[in-house]
Amino acid sequence: MGVFSRFTDIINSNINNLLDKAEDPAKMVRLIIQEMEDTLVEVRSSSAKTLADKKELTRQVSRFEQEAEQWQEKAELALSKDREDLARAALVEKKKCVESAQSLIDELSHVDEHITKLQDEISQLQDKLADAKARQKAIIMREKTASSRLKVKRNIDSDKVNDALSRFDSYERKIDNLEAQVESYDLGSKSLADEIAELEGDEHIDDELAQLKTRMQSNKKTK
C-alpha cells in the first residue's frame, strides 16, 4: 500500500507531518519520493495523451470547417444552375459540418482546461518532489552525522579505551617513582656550583660582620 491513496493526497500532503509520524523517517522519505516519481510519470503520460487528443480534435475541426466551405461552394454552384433543391441539400450538409465543428470546438475548450489543470498539478508535484528530495539529503546527512558521533561516543566510553588510559596512569606512576629514586641519590650531596655559592654567601656575611664591628667601635669612641 502506498503512502498516498490518490494524486490529490500528494498535492495536499504535509511532508513534515508524515515524517514526524514515521518510525523510520529515512525509509518513509524514500517511499514518498518513489511514489511521487511514479505518479509524475503517470500524470505526464496522461498529459501527453490529452495533448495528442487535442491535436486530433483540432484536425477534425479543421476538416469539418473545410467540408462546410466545400458544401457552401456546392450550394452556390447548384443555385447558379437553377437547382434550388440541390442548393438546399448542400446547405443542410454544410449545417451539419458547422454543428459538428462547433461541438468539437466546445470539447476542445474542456480539453484546454484539463491540460491547464494537469500542467498546474505537474508543477505542484515537481515542487513537492524537490522538497522531498531536499529533505532526504538532510535526513541522510543527519543520520551519517549521528552515526559518526555514536561511534565516537562508543569508542570514548569503551572498556578498551578506559583500560588503556588506566595503564598510562600506571606507567606514569612508575616513571615518577624512578625519577624520585634518582633525585633521592642527589639529596645531601653538593655540586661544585652549590659549594661555590655557599662560599660567596659566607664572604658576604664576613663583610657585613666587619662593617658591624667598625660601626660599634666608632660608637664607643664617640661616647
Image: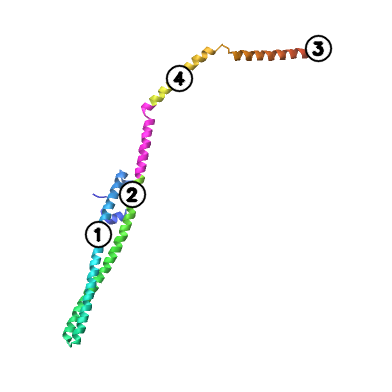
Disc ID at residue 169:
none
Kindly report which numbered mark, 3 or 4, lies closer to the viewer in this rendering: 4
Q: Residues within 10 Å of mark 4 (few under 14, many from 20)?
A: few
N-term-proximal mark, 2 vs 3:
2
For disc 1, the marked residue is 46
For disc 4, the marked residue is 173
Residues at marks 3 and 1 touching, judged by CB atoms closer than 8 Å: no
Q: Residues within 10 Å of mark 2 (few under 14, many from 20)?
A: some
Kindly report which numbered mark, 4 or 1, lies closer to the viewer in this rendering: 1
For disc 3, the marked residue is 220
N-term-proximal mark, 2 vs 1:
1
For disc 2, the marked residue is 133
N-term-proximal mark, 3 vs 1:
1
The range drawn in magenta is 139-161
Look at label 3 and name its amino acid.
Lys
Residues at marks 4 and 1 touching, judged by CB atoms closer than 8 Å: no
Residue 220: give x, y in percent of width and height: 81, 12
Residue 154: give x, y in percent of width and height: 36, 32
